[in-house]
Amino acid sequence: MNFSLLHLPLEANAPLPVIARRPAQLVGNTPVLWIDEPFAPLGRGFYAKLEGANPGGIKDRPGLHMVREARRRGELTPGAPIVESSSGTLGLGLALAGLTYGHPVTVVSDPGMEPSMVRLLTALGAHVEHVAAPHPEGGWQQSRRERVAELLAGIPDAYCPDQYHNPDNVAAYRPLATELIAQLGRVDVLVAAVGTGGHSAGTASVLRESFPGLTLIGVDAISSAIFGQPAGPRLMRGLGSSIHPANVDYGAFAEVHWVAPAEAVWACRQLARRHYASGGWSVGAVALVAGWVARTFSDGTRVAAIFPDGPHRYLETVYNDAWCDEHGLLGQEPPLEPDEIAEPDECVVTGWTRCNKVRDPLGRTPAADRSEAGVR
């Protein structure tokens, strides 16, 4: 065995790892990794912001911020319970916030939450409750939100952050944007998954303060209602929605791409094998689209992509051959180019598809106007 690496001199100016006194201090300052082949040719790749390096993933940021702001305003009193709907990642962020600020946390989820995530949330001190059936129109999200409302009505002083409509969710991502500016110097295109709408809206709005010409590209799941497609059952968790979150800033997007599960699985596994950095459904879908941007936009375009989490909660799904084979997700390399539609509701998309017309399906006031008007 060659031990020479053990005796290499330390660089005098190498930054020292952070010593945290509390786990919340580990949130933020996540690394960026250059990704090229097989998503784009050498020299034409994109920069991936690895939010899985946070203790619980990207939603540690809004979990802490929403709770902190609610306490500051007096909406959340000391020691009062926190109750929220989550498919998993925000649950981790709220568990961290509960530990940090001294609040019990109840996460309302559904049977699609991975058993490993249930065990992890429980180990972190959160109580997990599952709804039994999807809402006939709003799917699992609406069913979970109705159960949250029932719990709030029966628990004095309980507080729900309401990640789908809370502007604090958007505001939580200012640090992520400032980190990208410090790390990359310039961002021309931002590729982000869309679920609650928080990290795409919050990151893009701050980047545009420095780069007004920023192009924001949204990534959604097939069978998601966010951008005007009909809602349906979805294997992919962490992006997409059966409801229409108010935090989605429709006017900020230049285009939207819908991605199917098999395409995301292919991308996740390529990331793991080629770059030793991967994650879940959102990560795979974002990488697929960011690679297309890097290939097709003009040479020199600086593309940043947000990877919301790591691979660990997906070991029994995305990275499980038997599970993927059962769902017909293996052996399907995605096309080099997405299909294109002129209108977001032109047809029901079943695979990677893009549309450069983005509008709120409900015709609501743009998010920026709601914020200026003080609408919460």
Image (spheres, rainbow, N blue to C red):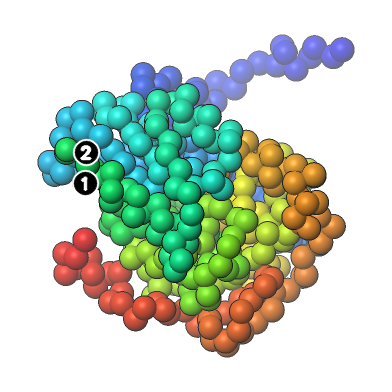
**Residue furthest out toward the right:** 1
Q: Position of residue 19 (x, y in %)?
A: 43, 19
**Which residue is nearer to you in this view: 245 or 26?**
245
Is 1 rendered above or below residue 47? Answer: above
Judge left or right: residue 236 versus residue 154.
right
> Which residue bears the numbered disc 1?
153
Local packing at callout 2 (Cα closer than 10 Å; few below 14, some 14-19, many 20+) is: few
Disc 1 and disc 2 in contact, CB within 8 angstroms: yes
Badge 1 marks a residue whose secondary structure is helix
> Which residue bears the numbered disc 2?
155
Q: Which amino acid does label 1 sit on?
A: Ala
**Which residue is nearer to you in this view: 55 or 151?**
151
Is 319 rendered above or below residue 190? Answer: above
Judge left or right: residue 75 versus residue 287.
left
**Which residue is nearer to you in this view: 284 or 2?**
284
**Which residue is nearer to you in this view: 38 or 242?**
242
Q: Position of residue 315 (x, y in %)?
A: 68, 38
Local packing at callout 1 (Cα closer than 10 Å; few below 14, some 14-19, many 20+) is: few
